[in-house]
Amino acid sequence: MSSSSHASRDRSAPVPRPGPVRVWLAEGAATLVMLLAMTVLFRHLLHPEAWPARHLTSDTGRLLADAVASGAVVGGLVASPLGRISGAHMNPAVTVMLGAAGRLPLARLPLYVSAQLAGSLAGTALGRVLLGDPVAHPQVRYALLRPLLDEPPSLIGIGEAVGTAVLLAVVVRLARDPRLEAVAPATIGATLTVLIILTAPVAGGSLNPARQFGPWLMAGRPGPAWPYLAGPLAAAVVVGALARLLPTRGTTAPATPR
């Protein structure tokens, strides 16, 4: 048999599916990096003695910096080697949506969600170790998100649900068309940036239970956490159920965050 025949056969062979341990480690590592990056960002963006915080004093400027940096980090992780192993969901809402849509085996949901929560806590704790006491400063609070406006928890939950639903709808669109795989990381990052800007005043702009989990625990569990859990997960179930009704198309499932 010719070498070209061997090459053709190799190219057509299916790519082995990563094992559960490898997926768990990759998903946990991606979420860890995301939370560590957010901890570093908030330490320099909000601590009163940090150079960026002294020169970027408006809420609008800080929100824009947070949104752009968050979108860039998430997009980069989706495109990274970690993303190619686990999909880099980094967000229980993404995982639940893909399960509800029939694009991820339900048996894998605990695997992904446990990795995301462990990575969230580990990333926040690592930020505390590396950056020291400034991370615990009341202005930084371990990168815990909170609305710019004083809103009731119910409105925060609604804002989180609406923003997450839009983000997940974009993920569904990307997942259904393999031709969009190359632009998926940038599209997800850009979408997240816009949604953070739009939802931060009312809800804080989390759109991801894992984004709040580690900071909330490390900060001593201040305030109710349920809006940041119930809102995104409710959106995940609804979007996933609607996606299941769509005609089958494509085979890939790009990931997202935040």
Image (cartoon, grey):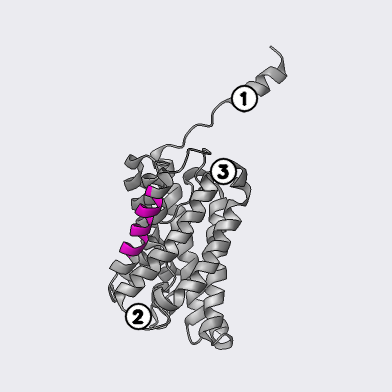
Disc on res. 10: 1
Q: Which of labels 2 and 1 is toward the front?
A: 2
The amino acid type found where label 1 is placed reads: Asp
Mark 2–mark 1 Cα distance, whole angstroms, equals 57 Å
Q: Is residue 126 visible?
A: no
* Residue underneath mark 2: 151
* Residue underneath mark 3: 177
- Dot 1 surroundings within 10 Å: few (below 14), some, or many (20 or more)? few
Question: Circle 2 — which element?
Answer: loop
The amino acid type found where label 3 is placed reads: Asp
User: Which residue range is magenta in the image?
Assistant: 229-241
Q: Is residue 222 magenta?
A: no
Q: Would residue 206 appear left or right of 181 to someone viewing this image?
A: left
Q: Is residue 231 magenta?
A: yes
Q: Is residue 59 visible?
A: yes
Q: Position of residue 84 (x, y in %)?
A: 53, 45
Identify which residue, 172 or 212, lies in the foreground. 172
